[in-house]
């Protein structure tokens, strides 16, 4: 996973983590109501106009930082476990390292999932009404994306996400499509190391879409098998293979290139699950380092360093 980080770093939001994050995240920004709704907006997408990038980034940074740090914490404390045969809880921690990490990766580039509550929805409706615009917005989960227009102005686009199968499945579907868009952009722009980047993205997506779950929900499926149905022999009395038992102890802390991505998810489910989760968590961690270095301040870097010390 050496090549994926570069195109992600090129897409980082300006001044992400450079200024203090605004408590409450993007929901708090919606509450402030410093936008108007585009007259041409129609369901299922809503476009919020008059978005100042310097204003909105600290709100997105609040959610980015909590997801990035939660991913790193889950990953670091997952790898301290698994030194013996008890790997069920380390595997679940590893899953959440990937889940939080995927959230942070998207937010770092100006997109993600947002849970809009009733108050947020009412504010959007009231502002739309003030501009004689009719919108269909209610409490629920939305995919948000910052969109730069030809005149360099910024819109915030909201699109309702159906949560059939649960919140986790809904998120992984959106993240899978995010990776698809990234691969397409890298190819169309003929970016540096495009071929290698696209190949690595395909490896991650191949595992995310394993066993016929082509929408990218395989990680959530295996998480449910482990957590709720106690499958794969990872709970006592530990019937999984010796190789699977040693996985947690052997996953790299920071170098995803050491991961073997060519694992058969059908024959070696636990190994494939571990590899895919670890790859996403490490991408998030490496992107966090890029954010800290680029921010021009030591605040976010100090937080990650303190967390690493807690786990050492």
Image: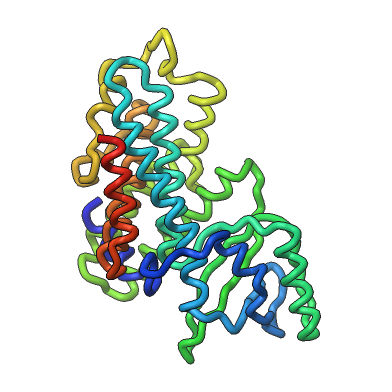
The residue sitting at 54% across, 50% down in the picture is 171
- Colour logic: rainbow
**Up-down: is 24 above or below 1?**
below
Q: Is residue 98 visible?
A: yes
Residue 297, image x and y in percent? Answer: 29, 67
The foreground one among 206 and 292 is: 292
Left or right, 214 with reference to 128: left
Extreme residue in the top direction: 237
Residue 211, image x and y in percent? Answer: 45, 36
The residue sitting at 31% across, 23% down in the picture is 82
Left or right, 91 with reference to 223: left
Q: The C terminus is located in which quarter? A: top left
**Up-down: is 81 above or below 123?**
above
Residue 280, image x and y in percent? Answer: 35, 47
Extreme residue in the bottom direction: 151
The total number of labels drawn is 0
Left or right, 267 with reference to 144: left
The residue sitting at 49% across, 32% down in the picture is 223
Where residue 301 sits, quadrant-wise, is bottom left
**Up-down: is 20 above or below 37?**
above
Residue 151, image x and y in percent? Answer: 48, 91
**Up-down: is 230 above or below 76?**
above
Where residue 115 sits, quadrant-wise, is bottom right
The residue sitting at 45% across, 47% down in the picture is 100
Q: Is residue 287 visible?
A: no
The foreground one among 131 and 218 is: 131
């Amino acid at each position: 996973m050496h090549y994926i980080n570069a195109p992600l770093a090129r897409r980082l939001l300006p001044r992400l983590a450079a200024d203090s994050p605004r408590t409450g995240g993007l929901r708090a920004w919606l509450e402030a109501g410093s936008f108007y709704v585009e007259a041409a907006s129609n369901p299922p997408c809503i476009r919020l106009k008059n978005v100042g990038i310097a204003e909105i980034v600290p709100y997105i940074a609040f959610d980015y930082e909590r997801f990035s740090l939660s991913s790193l914490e889950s990953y670091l404390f997952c790898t301290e476990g698994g030194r013996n045969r008890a790997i069920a809880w380390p595997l679940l921690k590893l899953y959440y390292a990937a889940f939080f990490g995927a959230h942070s990766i998207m937010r770092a580039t100006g997109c993600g999932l947002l849970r809009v509550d009733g108050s947020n929805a009412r504010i959007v409706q009231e502002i739309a009404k003030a501009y004689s615009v009719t919108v269909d917005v209610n409490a629920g989960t939305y995919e948000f994306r910052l969109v730069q227009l030809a005149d360099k102005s910024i819109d915030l686009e909201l699109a309702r996400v159906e949560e059939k199968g649960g919140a986790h499945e809904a998120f992984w579907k959106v993240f899978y499509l995010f990776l698809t868009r990234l691969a397409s952009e890298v190819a169309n722009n003929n970016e540096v190391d495009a071929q290698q980047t696209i190949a690595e993205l395909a490896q991650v997506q191949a595992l995310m879409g394993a066993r016929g779950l082509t929408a990218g929900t395989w990680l959530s499926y295996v998480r449910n098998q482990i957590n709720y149905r106690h499958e794969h022999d990872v709970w006592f009395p530990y019937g999984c293979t010796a190789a699977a038992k040693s996985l947690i102890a052997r996953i790299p802390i920071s170098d995803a290139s050491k991961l073997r991505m060519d694992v058969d998810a059908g024959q070696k489910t636990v190994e494939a699950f571990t590899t895919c989760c670890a790859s996403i968590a490490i991408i998030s961690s490496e992107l966090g380092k890029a954010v800290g270095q680029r921010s021009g301040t030591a605040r976010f870097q100090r937080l990650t360093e303190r967390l690493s010390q807690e786990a050492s």
